[in-house]
Amino acid sequence: MTRAWTLPLLLLLPGSLVGAGLILRGDVVGGAALLALFVLLAVVHSPLVFPRSLGAPEAQRRSAVDGRPVVFWRPGCKYCIRLRIRLGRRAREVHWVDIWRDPAGAAVVRAANDGNETVPTVLVAGRPHVNPDPAWVREQLAPSA
């Protein structure tokens, strides 16, 4: 779990120090802008942006029942962030598995990618798709009501 928060903390702590230093030197606007930028970067690279993760067995079981895709991801992955942002509100319809928190999920990804933990890996109907186009993933979801 701590590995998922390493990058956000590495962004937040130095950004806070530099921003506070600028504010103390009298550059309130620059310091506040820099601090806001680093907070935004920390949030985007944290698990907070993603819907709650499931374990791989539970996600695959739910996918078999409702037919929705399973997305294997990890915090800090720019392609995972791109997929999450491009899915928008529909991201809550997908089953998310954080491979850094779930060893079974990491094993599924390695099995699908010749031993590599390449994410996002999306399972649709039991077939893996590595870093698919977000528009394609949206097409795999049932039409919204």
Image: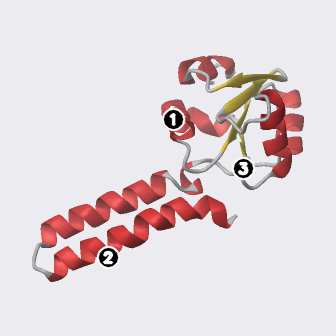
- Residue beneath label 3, please? 53
Residue drawn at x 69%, y 35% is 94
Q: Would you say 90 lies left or right of 142 here?
A: left
- Residue beneath label 2, please? 17
Q: Residues within 10 Å of mark 3 (few under 14, many from 20)?
A: some
Alpha carbon distance from label 2 to label 3: 32 Å
Horizontal and vertical percent position of residue 82: 50, 35
Q: What amino acid type is highlighted by mark number 2? A: Leu
Quadrant of residue 96 in the image?
top right
Quadrant of residue 97 in the image?
top right
Alpha carbon distance from label 1 to label 2: 32 Å
- Residue beneath label 1, please? 88
Horizontal and vertical percent position of residue 73: 66, 42
Tell which of 84 and 4 is nearer to you: 4
Q: Residues within 10 Å of mark 1 (few under 14, many from 20)?
A: few
Q: What amino acid type is highlighted by mark number 1? A: Gly
Residue drawn at x 50%, y 40% is 78
Vertical relation: 111 (above or below) 4: above
Q: Are marks 1 and 2 in contact (CB under 8 Å)?
A: no
Q: Would you say 5 lies left or right of 94 here?
A: left
